[in-house]
Image (spheres, rainbow, N blue to C red):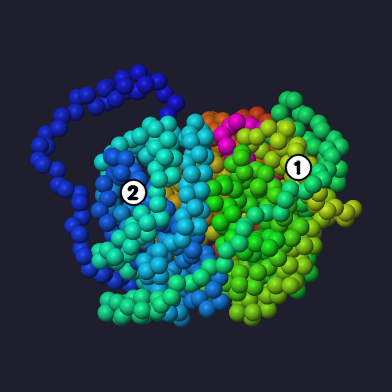
């Protein structure tokens, strides 16, 4: 961390130099003996929200101290990447019983690791899915991976090696400390970044397909394995039955599947780029404001806060608040289904191949009040990011295989979520508090069946095909010259009209006054309690600072009183949110878990603590501590690109001067006891909903 080594050396000597080691016994070996057979575990819980199976292939693993051992680590990594690349293709098979498929590495102890194959499935497809998983595992043992997949994996790892090296000076202290501790635990060598970068680059170039396929076969031939079935059906799979299903899956592998090959590439860059008709530079804050020929506006903040990182965002008013009720469900699913289907003529596995070696991601979302496009990339991949976002806007589609997969996943998730006490309670509270408002939707078998892909695509196009009401933001490690060139070509060619967007600011009707809702849903002996306070409070940046101070101080005070003095809960927190879009509605939640037998006592104690807080206000010490913590956190936040992205998003959403948000530290440090007390009185005298989720058996008694 940020400390003088000589100062730290003195601290270490002062703290530890007088300690003596009186234990001279030989250390016990931390190696776990091999157990060369198959073990089965069936994990059942009413609250498990998914059904899955994992196969753990266990191996001893000491840390890398030689070049060959480092190469072996990279080969293992490539095995996982290549299996996962092919997994996405298997999931699009119309006949698959799998809802999820992946391979990962887990460390069981510091000296024993596991290669883990994971599969998700619907509750009624357990055995068929397990057979299919083992058929896929055996397929690659029999026929191996392909040269094309090796090339993709190499590109991805080489790019990761490059990006990590570029970002080495931006890494926080904690990950470096974890890495040092990890090398000590497993007997590895801590390698200099420059050396490791050069070594990994050289070794990745040398790894052959034969080496990768050999390693994969070694992994799946290991007899030291554990199979874990997780779910809620309570039906156990015995070792004998599992081994029969494994054999069945392996026998179903007969012939090698032929993959169609075609060149994967994006359409060419637009031949004609738009002009930038306005270019303003905010010298004080270092921000460029552009207006393009098609009236699209772009804000760009160049930074070197984190090397090789660029964030992207686009925001428009609208959302789902003005959409007819009958269209809501299709609208809520539209963005995910369209983005998962990949734009243009590419398939999802072709896109995965194309993106190998590139560091980027993006998403489209439709919220209650806004449409949002978000993304990020390395500095070198910014053009590809903007190209893909442009293509997603111009050529959206819904792939029928992707739609089938997502629909099946929704059916499966619904079955499991209905077993989840938290989900069922959330539905019940929502229906009570908002009086069964038809705009608040929860999935059902009928609603999932009715989802219409054509309507989804139409709604997506309505929301994202017209860009004049979107505000675009870029923050990160790139140059104005590059940004100007890219936005001219990829954003300047987006279609626009003179349409304006708005949202409905009216809150959903709710039960006013003091309300109490108790539901017997928990399958364990615990009560989850929440106090939701609600009022109207006109927004200002200073008011937001006061609310932030209130929730910070009150959280610590309640933690001390309820957790430490009364030993009533492991944790309690206060969370406040002033929703400007909803006519300045302020919501404050106080949530905690407790012994059901003490819930009345603790709710009373919480309300009493809040009353005392309103009456007396915070102490000078509490305010000083809050400001001290905020100053440290604020200084850290300012060193992150996400801080600047958020500031520019707020300015775009509310048309508030940027300086108002950038000076939030001054606002916080000017907060007074009287201001906190005044807002506390307003919020805690407002409407109140107390919701309690208690154990089933307690309510029956």
**SS for dot 2:** helix
Residue at figure coordinates x 60%, y 51% from the top left: 361
Q: Position of residue 503 (x, y in %)?
A: 79, 57
Taking depth in this image into account, of 28 and 208 the one nearest to the observer is: 208
The reply to whether residue 660 is in sight is no
Q: Name the disc covering residue 487, or none.
A: 1
Is 295 rendered above or below residue 449? above
| x then y, percent, for residue 488 | 79, 42
Please state which of residues 323 and 619 is positioned toward the viewer in this rendering. 323
Residues 181 and 649: in front is 181
The answer to whether residue 139 is above or below residue 280 is: below
Q: Farthest residue in the left direction? A: 25
Image quadrant assignment for residue 657: top right
Of badges 1 and 2, nearer the viewer stands: 2
Q: Of the numbered discs in the image, which one, if any, rests on residue 316?
A: none
Q: Is residue 411 above or below residue 12?
A: below
Q: Residue at x 50, y 39 (%)?
A: 162
Is 307 colored magenta in this rendering?
yes
Q: Who's the residue at 66% across and 48% down the image?
A: 385
Q: Which residue in the protein does label 2 denote?
A: 72
Task: Name the side, left or right, on which 311 lies relative to 206.
Answer: right
Q: Is residue 172 magenta?
A: no
Q: Position of residue 289 (x, y in %)?
A: 78, 35
Q: Residue at x 83, y 38 (%)?
A: 276
Query: What residue range appears in magenta?
Result: 302-313
Q: Is residue 178 left or right of residue 515?
A: left
Picture mark count:
2
């Amino acid at each position: 961390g940020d400390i003088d080594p000589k100062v730290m050396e003195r601290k270490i000597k002062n703290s530890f130099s007088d300690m003596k080691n009186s234990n001279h016994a030989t250390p016990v070996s931390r190696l776990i003996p091999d157990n060369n057979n198959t073990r089965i575990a069936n994990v059942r819980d009413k609250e498990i929200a998914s059904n899955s199976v994992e196969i753990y292939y266990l191996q001893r693993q000491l840390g890398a101290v030689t070049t060959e051992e480092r190469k072996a680590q990279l080969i293992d990594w490539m095995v996982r990447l290549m299996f996962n690349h092919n997994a996405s293709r298997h999931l699009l098979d119309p006949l698959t019983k799998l809802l999820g498929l992946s391979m990962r590495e887990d460390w069981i102890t510091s000296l024993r690791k596991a290669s883990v194959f994971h599969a998700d499935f619907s509750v009624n497809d357990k055995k068929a899915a397990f057979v299919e998983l083992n058929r896929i595992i055996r397929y690659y043992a029999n026929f191996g991976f392909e040269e094309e997949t090796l090339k993709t994996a190499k590109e991805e790892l080489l790019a990761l090696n490059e990006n990590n090296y570029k970002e080495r000076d931006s890494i926080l202290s904690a990950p470096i400390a974890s890495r040092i501790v990890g090398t000590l635990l497993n007997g590895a060598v801590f390698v200099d970044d420059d050396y490791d970068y050069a070594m990994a680059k050289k070794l990745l170039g040398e790894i052959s397909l034969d080496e990768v396929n050999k390693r994969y076969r070694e992994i799946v031939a290991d007899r030291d394995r554990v199979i874990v079935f997780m779910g809620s059906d309570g039906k156990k799979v015995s070792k004998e039955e599992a081994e029969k299903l494994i054999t069945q899956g392996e026998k179903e592998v007969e012939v090698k599947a032929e993959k169609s090959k075609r060149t994967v590439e994006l359409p060419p860059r637009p031949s004609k780029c738009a002009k930038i008709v306005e270019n303003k530079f905010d010298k004080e804050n270092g921000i460029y404001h552009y207006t393009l020929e098609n009236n699209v506006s772009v804000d760009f903040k160049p930074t070197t806060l984190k090397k090789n990182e660029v964030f992207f965002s686009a925001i428009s008013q609208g959302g789902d608040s003005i959409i007819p009720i009958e269209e809501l469900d299709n609208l809520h699913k539209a963005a995910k289904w369209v983005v998962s289907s990949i734009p243009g003529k590419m398939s999802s596995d072709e896109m995965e191949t194309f993106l190998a070696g590139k560091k980027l991601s993006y998403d489209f979302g439709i919220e209650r009040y806004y449409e949002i496009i978000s993304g990020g990339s390395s500095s070198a991949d910014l053009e590809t990011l903007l190209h893909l976002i442009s293509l997603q806007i111009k050529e959206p589609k819904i792939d029928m295989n992707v739609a089938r997969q997502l629909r099946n996943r929704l059916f499966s998730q619904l079955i499991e979520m209905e077993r989840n006490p938290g989900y069922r309670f959330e539905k019940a509270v929502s229906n009570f508090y908002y009086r069964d408002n038809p705009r608040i939707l929860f999935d059902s078998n009928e609603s999932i069946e009715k989802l219409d892909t054509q309507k989804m695509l139409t709604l997506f196009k309505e929301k994202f095909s017209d860009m004049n009401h979107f505000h675009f933001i870029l923050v990160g490690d790139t140059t104005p010259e590059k940004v100007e060139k890219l936005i001219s070509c990829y954003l300047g060619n987006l279609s626009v009209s003179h349409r304006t967007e708005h949202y409905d600011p009216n809150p959903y009707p709710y039960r006013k006054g003091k309300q109490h809702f108790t539901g017997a849903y928990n399958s364990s002996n615990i009560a989850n309690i929440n106090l939701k306070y609600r009022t109207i409070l006109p927004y200002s940046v200073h008011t937001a600072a006061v609310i932030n101070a209130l929730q910070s101080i009150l959280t610590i005070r309640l933690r001390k009183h309820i957790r430490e003095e009364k030993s009533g809960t492991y944790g309690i927190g206060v969370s406040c949110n002033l929703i400007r879009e909803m006519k300045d509605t302020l919501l404050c939640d106080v949530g905690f878990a407790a012994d059901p037998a003490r819930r009345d006592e603790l709710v009373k104690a919480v309300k009493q603590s809040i009353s005392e807080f309103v009456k007396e206000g915070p102490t000078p010490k509490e305010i000083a501590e809050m400001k001290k913590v905020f100053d440290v956190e604020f200084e850290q936040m300012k060193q992150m690109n996400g801080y600047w992205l958020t500031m520019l998003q707020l300015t775009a959403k509310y048309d508030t001067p940027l300086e108002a948000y950038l000076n939030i530290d001054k606002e916080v440090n000017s907060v007074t006891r009287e201001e906190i007390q005044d807002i506390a009185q307003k919020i805690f005298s407002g409407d109140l909903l107390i919701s309690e989720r208690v154990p089933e058996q307690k309510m029956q008694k």
